[in-house]
């Protein structure tokens, strides 16, 4: 707003929104596009994205802009001026180009940066130079200031509720409210929104005060599940802090409760059970599974489009504009792990690494005795290395885990890009870790969504993403909120003029 009259850019945004125009989204720290996909499915227009990783940026450009070169380039947000970015992507005047800003700076940027420091960083352009941890936050603020969105969404790990003794979302809310936004934040778990994965995250939404939204809201759950102690405990700790140490957190909302009976959580089998089986040991024996990079430029597995499937699998096969490819699956490929396939077959569903390590050690010792090997001899050590994983079970209790077919899975992490042992397929006949496409299914990416790069970058992109189905639920709630707000405005011009006075 100016001191003398209404903000013309805001007026034009309000007029577009009031006339039913498609709201334009800019995705910061976008990765391959989990948030973008959810907002796209909810009826928003994905105008662009800022992403540093080249493979993820290429994936985003491929899926949302047909591979257009200018949308596929990586950008370092700390070194990319918002106006220059808008010019590069030909988005138009920077203060008119975007209606909704989504994303979230990595939580490391907030380490021990207190409320006074955050305000200092916002108010003094050079302040962030003295604290590099605040650079990404400063960059996010720069984009808010430049694009002046009607609404914004930030997502992060639950730990930001107590990051070094600070409630980061509350501090972010303070800064955004000073910029003219009304903010609220909460915790959402993807398993309650139709995703076959227990993934707890903090979501913060904010709306321009001119919209008259006094109480931003979050979507009600669609699915029910009893969280295991590890997940339920992290939520309980966060909520205890908010009721104790951070009792003054006036922008926090309790996670939404359901208003009726809910469907049970989607299970691992419902998510991936219809995909073509990959029998790892047989593939190893016949030579079809080899060491080397896995590329996704051509289909490698025939795809049975009409195979019986669950409601969840049907959603991901029939996702508008990302329908299952009739030619086959490009990325239903697995890691080359010859030492471990037999061990995977022996594991029971739900088993973890310590149990597996004991089993592997017993098998090795029996084989060593059978071969008459002397303990700690070179031959003994060689056989042990071939049969027993080297990780200390006391230090890595959760390193290996076998899915349970009748339950949702644990959180998919970016570490999938390293080994994927955290998600071993429940089917002992297949005896392997999950494929890239199965990871995508468990994260709720539709079958027609493509990942650029080889296997490791693809796994990392999936693990770093916001589950698109959860993003869609949040985006739908935001779309309804904005629509109801602009419908209730006397007129965009009057609203803007009143705010400028």
Image (cartoon, rainbow, N blue to C red):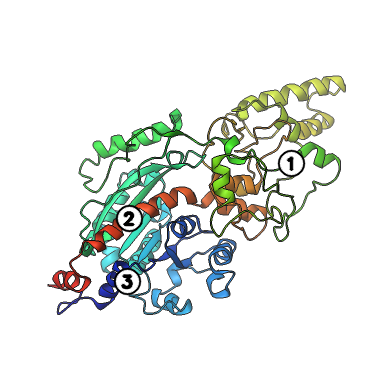
Residue neighbourhood size for the residue with mark 2, other residues' Cα within 10 Å, grouped as few (<14), some (14–19), many (≥20): few
- Can you tell which mark lies on residue 16? 3
CA separation, marks 3 and 1?
A: 50 Å
Residue neighbourhood size for the residue with mark 1, other residues' Cα within 10 Å, grouped as few (<14), some (14–19), many (≥20): some
| Residue that mark 2 sits on | 480
Q: Is residue 351 left or right of residue 198?
A: right
CA separation, marks 3 and 2?
A: 15 Å
Q: Is residue 196 visible?
A: yes
Foreground pick, 467 / 41:
41
Q: Does label 2 or label 1 sit earlier along the sequence?
A: 1
Q: Quadrant of residue 457?
A: bottom right
- x%, y% of residue 90? 46, 79
Q: Quadrant of the C terminus?
A: bottom left
Q: Quadrant of the N terminus?
A: bottom left
Q: Is residue 499 left or right of residue 138?
A: left
- x%, y% of residue 463? 54, 49
- x%, y% of residue 250? 21, 47
Secondary structure found at label 3? helix
Q: Quadrant of residue 313?
A: top right
Q: Does label 3 or label 1 sit earlier along the sequence?
A: 3
Mark in front: 3 vs 1: 3
Q: Is residue 176 visible?
A: no
Secondary structure found at label 1? loop
| Residue that mark 1 sits on | 278
Q: Does label 3 or label 2 sit earlier along the sequence?
A: 3
């Amino acid at each position: 707003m100016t001191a003398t009259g209404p903000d013309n850019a805001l007026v034009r945004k309000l007029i577009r929104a009031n006339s039913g125009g498609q709201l334009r989204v800019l995705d910061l720290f976008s990765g391959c596009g989990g948030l973008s996909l959810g907002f796209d499915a909810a009826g928003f227009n994905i105008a662009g994205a800022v992403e540093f990783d080249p493979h993820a940026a290429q994936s985003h450009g491929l899926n949302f802009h047909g591979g257009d070169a200018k949308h596929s380039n990586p950008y370092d947000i700390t070194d990319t001026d918002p106006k220059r970015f808008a010019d590069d992507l030909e988005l138009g005047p920077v203060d008119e180009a975007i209606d909704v800003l989504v994303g979230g700076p990595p939580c490391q940027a907030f380490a021990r940066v207190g409320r006074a420091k955050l305000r200092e960083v916002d108010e003094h352009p050079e302040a962030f130079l003295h604290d590099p941890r605040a650079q990404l936050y400063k960059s996010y603020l720069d984009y808010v200031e430049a694009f002046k969105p009607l609404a914004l969404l930030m997502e992060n790990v639950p730990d930001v509720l107590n990051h070094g003794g600070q409630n980061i979302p509350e501090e972010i809310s303070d800064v955004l409210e000073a910029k003219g936004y009304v903010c609220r934040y909460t915790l959402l778990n993807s398993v309650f929104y139709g995703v076959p994965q227990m993934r707890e995250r903090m979501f913060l939404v904010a709306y321009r005060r001119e919209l008259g939204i006094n109480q931003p809201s979050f979507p009600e759950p669609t699915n029910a599940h009893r969280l295991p102690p590890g997940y339920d405990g992290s939520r309980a700790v966060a909520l205890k802090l908010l009721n104790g140490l951070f009792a003054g957190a006036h922008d926090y909302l309790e996670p939404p409760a359901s208003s009726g009976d809910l469907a049970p959580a989607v299970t691992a089998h419902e998510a991936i059970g219809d995909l073509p089986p990959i029998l790892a040991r047989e593939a190893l024996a016949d030579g079809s599974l080899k060491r080397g990079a896995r590329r996704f430029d051509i289909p490698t597995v025939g795809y049975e489009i009409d195979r019986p499937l669950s409601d969840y699998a049907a959603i991901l096969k029939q996702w508008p504009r990302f329908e299952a490819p009739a030619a086959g699956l490009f990325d239903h490929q697995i890691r080359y792990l010859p030492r471990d396939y037999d061990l995977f077959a022996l594991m029971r569903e739900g088993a973890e690494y310590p149990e597996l390590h004991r089993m592997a050690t017993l098998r090795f010792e029996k084989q060593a005795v059978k071969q008459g090997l002397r303990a700690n001899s070179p031959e003994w050590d060689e056989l042990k290395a071939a049969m027993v994983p080297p990780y200390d079970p006391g230090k890595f209790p959760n390193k290996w885990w076998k899915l349970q077919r009748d339950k949702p899975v644990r959180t998919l992490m970016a570490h999938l890009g390293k080994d994927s042992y955290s998600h071993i397929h429940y089917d002992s006949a297949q005896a392997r870790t999950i494929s890239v496409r199965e990871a995508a299914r468990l994260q709720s990416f539709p079958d027609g969504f493509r990942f650029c790069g080889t296997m490791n970058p693809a796994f990392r992109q999936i693990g770093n993403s916001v589950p698109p189905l959860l993003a869609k639920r949040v985006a739908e709630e935001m779309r309804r909120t904005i629509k109801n707000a602009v419908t209730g405005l006397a007129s965009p011009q009057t609203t803007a003029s009143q705010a400028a006075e």
